[in-house]
Image (cartoon, rainbow, N blue to C red):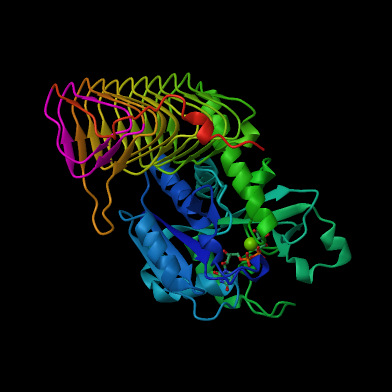
Amino acid sequence: MSEKINVVILAAGKGTRLKIDTAKPLCPAAGKTLVDFVIESLSACSKNLGIEIDYNLVVGHKKEELMKHVKGSFPNLKINYAVQKEQLGTGHAVKTFFDAFPAAWENKFTFVVCADTPLIKPETYTEIYREVNHSGADAVCVTFTTNDPYGYGRIEHGEPGFNIVEEKDATEAQKKINEVNSGLYIFKTEHIKNFIEKIDDKNKSGEFYLTDLFKVGYNVRSHVFRDAKEFLGVNNLIQLEEVESLILERKKHELMLNGIKIINSQSSYIEPSVTIAAETTIYPHVSLMGNTQIGKHVIIEPGAVIKDSKIEDGVTVKAYSYFEKAHVKANSDIGPFARLREGSVISEECKIGNFVETKKSVLHKGVKVSHLSYVGDAEIGQNTNIGCGFITCNYDGAQKHKTTIGKDSFIGSDCQMIAPINLGDRVYIGSGSTINKDVPDDAFAIARQRQTTKEGMAPKFIKKK
Ligand code: UD1
Ligand code: MG
């Protein structure tokens, strides 16, 4: 017998009750999919226990999509896939797995978990593993009590053991039982071997129920967990919404317990993948997503959306700014209403004001672009000030071109740079200039028509109503 544990994740079902085209295990929640949460939690349990897990996914409905996703999300995890051609029930799914991987009978214990219960914590897997290992029971079924048992298998206790009665098969009296099956179990693998062939499909659904591995008379235990929310299963889109809110709530509570101030936390969306350092303040209605890292003493004002970005210490992100794959270094001040697109690197102590868009541009320390500008494919040197209404004309209809501006320069308002173009250090560009020739260090350039003033001529043009 090996010390490795089998994990069988049931993910072949159609998810008919969802009424959407997406395979249930791939339903999105808080930036990941349901099955991602299940695998992550199990791998954390494997680390806690110091025991190796053999990961197995039973796939069927939309199997190619599902396998491709899981391989992409967990490139370093070896996962076996057993294909259940027809979804004849959860018991049939487990049998399909052992038929495909008979070597798995050698592992002493087997977890079976549904791909649609993403909130189960690593500690729970660890706890039931210890229980089956030490109690002498052949299997442990995780149960919880609920005022709304509808849809779950009811636990009907006997002595010893218990039956699990599915919703469709339950009598009115059984439907009133409020201890229910979470869908998470750990078995001595031998118990599955002894009883799996005895499961039949003589029930209202005509399915082979895995729950028939639990019966009055069997040496099996039920373990009631107090936090029913942890076992919430996703069978419809209302439950998906509930599960997602709980994932987000967990994340926000964890952040707050680590010194991050989140004002009116229910209103913000912070994905579990985001990291935030202590003493940062998040105002209401903020969205933080993907691979986002936020430093300490950062202030994020209402309505900001930050995806896959790095925000260093002491930065202020003013209201309604939108970042994607951007990097903002310490003590910069961004927004309100700024848009930092992919490849924007805003160095220390910069100021990006309202209605400024940046893309694939490096702004060195202390650069200011305070109002209404587009900075694309550009590099701007230290302490340069860009006036209002500045535009890099970076696109000629076919290709993108680069604008370079040196340090300590001053670009007047309403200037356009026709890229490719290079401006030196300490240059001064007069307002309203369209610059299409390079400007050397220390030069002044102006490119606009001279003003003509005709005294007394205004009345000719002023229209009267
Ligand atoms: C199941 C349990 C129920 C429990 C509930 C907890 C059974 C018979 N019932 O019901 O007691 O209270 O979970 O959430 O097990 N699947 C397959 N192949 C199949 C059928 C299902 O892989 O042939 C997969 C599904 O993709 C899903 C999981 O098994 O991930 C559970 O199936 P689902 O239809 O959601 O079962 P429930 O009705 O929720
Ligand atoms: Mg379910």
Q: Quadrant of the C terminus?
A: top right
Residue 201: percent from the left, percent from the top? 66, 79
The reply, left or right, for residue 9 in relation to residue 89 is left
Residue at image position (51%, 20%) is 259
- Residue displayed at 68% across by 64% down: 215
- Locate residue 286: give its quadrant: top right
Nearer to the camera, 137 or 309: 309
Frontmost residue, 240 versus 163:
240
Q: Residue furthest left?
A: 440
Is residue 180 shown left or right of residue 71?
A: right
Identify the residue shown where x is 44% and y is 18%.
297
How many numbered markers are drawn?
0
User: Observer-nearest residue: 165 or 30?
Assistant: 30
Q: Is residue 313 left or right of residue 255?
A: left
User: In percent of the image, x 49 and y 40: which residue is there?
Assistant: 272
Magenta extent: 414-441
Specify the farthest residue to the right: 172
- Ligand 2 occupies quarter: bottom right
Residue 451 is at least partly visible in this image: yes
Q: Is residue 222 visible?
A: no
Percent x, y for residue 386?
32, 27
Image position, residue 101 (x, y; %): 39, 71
Q: Is residue 299 above or below residue 375?
A: above
Quarter occupied by residue 99: bottom left
Is residue 366 left or right of 299 when viewed as pictured? left
Give the vertical position of 25 relative to 198 (above or below). above
* Most frequent secondary structure within the magenta stretch: loop
Q: Is residue 27 magenta?
A: no
Q: Quadrant of the N terminus?
A: bottom left
Could you tell me residue 460's position as x and y percent?
A: 51, 35
